[in-house]
């Protein structure tokens, strides 16, 4: 009888009051729908076949990484997901489901923990040794792109984000010979897409940003003091520091790659030009998925631990945390992005056209290497088309302006840290190889 009750209520209500009520609720509904559509942000509508392309993907089993994994698999690409535990039941189940749903058998999971230099070296050595094992035999052992996504935004992940940043850099440096060989036979540059783990990079100030402290080797006392200082910062600033540091790292990496400098230099002129010409065979740039619902939920009291210095009883703290989280949920749902919505800018960076600088002006080329008319990039169908170049930062499909001069102290500290880790691992390998396990690059273990 709901319909009869509604008719009775409308007949007993004055016409003007009914219209006002309907107009009010209609306006609220339209406002919510409009805000929700606006918060989705950039939508990638590029449709390109990626058959025959090979991508390395980190964080491919959660959040934005999983959404990117699904789209790449549906486009026919060969995807190798790097994960610390490729033999876990959840990983195997997800792989089987994706292979079945996308009709793509070229999906793999391999062991590579970005928090472990030894694991990274095992993966790279295995890839170089027999990259065809476990793959489709008629595909060339090559890499067409590397996509770095976060591991789900957990508390443990945020605490080791600085070390994982070094791990990403180490992986690319060790794979550089493979990337250069792949670029030599590719019609378009190899893309290294760094997905920011936090959208709050703009919340960092000069007082709270000390890039060398994120990567430099420190004594135990200094490391503990640095960790204590980091805990005193808000989670927004902590995540923003690592995100901004990753942007600077890959920007400096691209600048030095473009100028063909084999070793780091303390001369700041290497990174003084913000607009690096995209003539390099390898393009490294950063993208921000935007404000995700998972990022907003991580800021709520229900997702954080109670401070040991809090005077509130645990029961009252739990009740207040639940109440605040429930009240904030509608705003999180409206203004936060789903994982697949945040993945759109990552897909745009993978499939978008490459902007190049030439003597005759701007030249734009697609992933297939064909020249694109730059005057029609945003015309015709009225869609926003994403164009990428090395060293840039992109958000909502558009480039975010960066300072015109950024000194190279962070790069120097990062590179020294990288050399120290590699030397340490080489020393361990020289002194203790008896009976050790070495990865074969396919997520398996073989006795040495």
Image: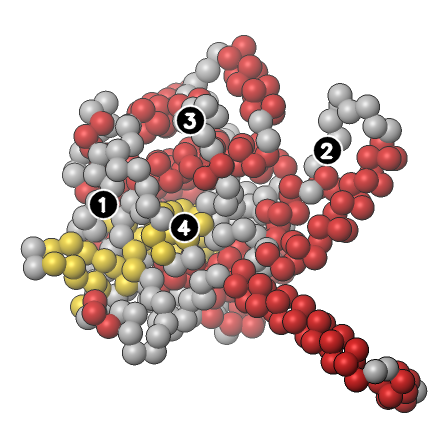
Q: Which of marks 4 and 1 is in front?
A: 1
| SS category of the residue bearing label 3 | loop
**Residue 311: where, in percent of width, then height?**
82, 23
Give the mark nearest the N terminus, 3 or 1.
Answer: 3
Q: Do the residues labelled 3 and 4 touch (CB within 8 Å)?
A: no
On screen, 18 above or below 161? below
Q: How crowded is mark 1: few (under 14 residues within 10 Å), some or many (20 or more)?
A: some
Which mark is on residue 85? none
Give the mark nearest the N terminus, 3 or 4.
Answer: 3
Give the residue number, with chain letter if any, for mark 4.
287
**Residue 181: in sight, yes or no?**
no
**Residue 61: where, in percent of width, then height?**
56, 54
In screen coordinates, is 176 left or right of 100?
A: left
**Residue 405: where, in percent of width, then height?**
26, 33
| SS category of the residue bearing label 2 | loop
Give the mark nearest the N terminus, 4 or 2.
Answer: 4
Q: Are marks 1 and 2 in contact (CB under 8 Å)?
A: no
Give the residue number, with chain letter if any, for mark 1.
275
Give the residue number, with chain letter if any, for mark 2.
305
**Residue 259: in sight, yes or no?**
yes
Q: Residues within 10 Å of mark 4 (few under 14, many from 20)?
A: many
* Residue plotted at (45% across, 66% down): 43
Q: Nearer the viewer, mark 3 or mark 4?
A: 3
């Amino acid at each position: 009888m709901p319909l009869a009750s509604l008719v009775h209520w409308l007949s007993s209500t004055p016409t003007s009051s009914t219209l006002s009520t309907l107009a009010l609720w209609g306006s609220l509904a339209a406002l919510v729908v409009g805000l929700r559509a606006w918060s989705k942000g950039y939508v990638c509508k590029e449709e390109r076949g990626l058959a025959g392309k090979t991508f390395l993907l980190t964080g491919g089993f959660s959040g934005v990484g999983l959404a990117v994994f699904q789209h790449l698999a549906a486009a026919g690409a060969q995807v190798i997901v790097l994960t610390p535990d490729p033999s876990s039941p959840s990983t195997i189940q997800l792989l089987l489901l994706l292979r079945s749903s996308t009709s793509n058998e070229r999906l793999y999971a391999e062991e590579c923990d970005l928090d472990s230099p030894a694991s990274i070296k095992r993966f790279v050595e295995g890839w170089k040794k027999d990259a065809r094992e476990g793959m489709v035999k008629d595909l060339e052992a090559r890499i067409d792109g590397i996509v770095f996504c976060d591991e789900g935004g957990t508390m443990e992940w945020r605490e080791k984000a600085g070390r994982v940043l070094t791990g990403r850099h180490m992986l690319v440096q060790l794979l550089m010979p493979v990337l250069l060989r792949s670029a030599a036979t590719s019609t378009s540059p190899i893309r290294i897409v760094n997905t920011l783990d936090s959208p709050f990079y703009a919340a960092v100030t000069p007082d709270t940003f000390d890039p060398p402290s994120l990567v430099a080797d420190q004594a135990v006392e200094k490391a503990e003091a640095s960790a204590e200082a980091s805990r005193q910062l808000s989670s927004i600033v902590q995540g923003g520091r690592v995100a901004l540091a990753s942007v600077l790292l890959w920007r400096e990496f691209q600048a030095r790659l473009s100028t063909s400098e084999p070793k780091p230099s303390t001369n700041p002129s290497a990174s003084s030009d913000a607009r690096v010409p995209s003539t390099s065979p390898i393009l490294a740039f950063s993208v921000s998925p935007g404000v995700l619902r998972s990022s907003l939920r991580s800021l709520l009291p229900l997702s954080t631990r109670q401070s040991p210095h809090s005077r509130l009883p645990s029961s009252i703290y739990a009740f207040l945390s639940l109440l605040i989280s429930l009240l904030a949920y509608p705003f999180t749902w409206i203004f936060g992005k789903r994982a697949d919505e945040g993945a759109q800018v990552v897909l745009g960076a993978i499939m978008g056209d490459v902007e190049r600088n030439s003597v005759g002006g701007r030249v734009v080329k697609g992933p297939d290497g064909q020249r694109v008319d730059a005057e029609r990039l945003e015309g015709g169908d009225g869609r926003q088309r994403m164009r990428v170049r090395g060293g840039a930062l992109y958000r909502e499909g558009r480039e975010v302006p960066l300072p015109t001069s950024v000194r190279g102290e962070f790069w120097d500290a990062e590179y020294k840290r990288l050399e120290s880790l590699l030397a340490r691992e080489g020393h361990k390998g020289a002194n203790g190889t008896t009976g050790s396990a070495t990865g074969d690059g396919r997520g398996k273990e073989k006795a040495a």
